[in-house]
Image: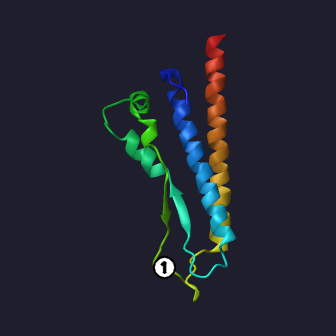
Amino acid sequence: MINSNAYDYINILDKAADGAWLRNEAIANNIANVDTPGYKRQDIDFESELRRALKNNRYQTVDEKVDNVILDRLKPGTYRDHEMFSYRLDGNNVDIDTENVELASNQIRYQGLIDSITQEFTNLKAVMK
């Protein structure tokens, strides 16, 4: 983590990319346990944590909101999705088709975050010339 106001967006994008990476691992774990009796689908929720951190004051600019985010508090939480729900007799609630769609969606999100980080560094590099 870089400690400078110039890197606030990069630090938040880095945390979001970490959250997307963790979500990728959770989805992969769900796919690996698709046939495990009693297994309940797990997921990572980073977006609501970031949304909560950025909505502190509606009268602030986005730059001010990003500057006020405490990065140590942005921790994605793992939760069991529809823990009481199961459409299968063995108690497993993982649907392989849904997991594959979520995996593809998350990979696109992760790639977009990495591209945004790269663009931020490109912008900083252009300013320093």
Q: Work out whether 18 lies above or below 129.
A: below
Residue at image x 38%, y 46%?
52
Q: Work out whether 114 lies above or below 91.
A: above
Residue with the most extreme top position: 129
Can you tell which quarter of the image residue 127 is in?
Answer: top right
Instruction: Tell whether 74 sits left or right of 21.
Output: left
Q: Circle 1: is it few (<14), some (14-19), or many (20+) Cα within 10 Å?
A: few
Q: Where is residue 8 drawn, in percent x and y?
A: 50, 28
Q: Work out whether 104 lies above or below 64.
A: below
* Residue type of the residue flagged with mark 1: Phe
Q: Where is residue 50 drawn, in percent x and y?
A: 45, 44
Q: How many marks?
A: 1
Q: Where is residue 80 drawn, in percent x and y?
A: 49, 67
Q: To which residue does mark 1 refer? A: 85
Q: Looking at the image, which is closer to me, 38 or 105?
A: 38
Q: Work out whether 86 lies above or below 99.
A: below
Can you tell which quarter of the image residue 62 is in?
Answer: top left
Does dot 1 land on a helix, a strand or a loop?
loop
Residue at image x 36%, y 41%?
55
Q: Where is residue 37 drawn, in percent x and y?
A: 61, 82
Residue at image x 66%, y 50%?
108
Residue at image x 45%, y 78%?
84
Which of the image's four quarters has the C terminus?
A: top right
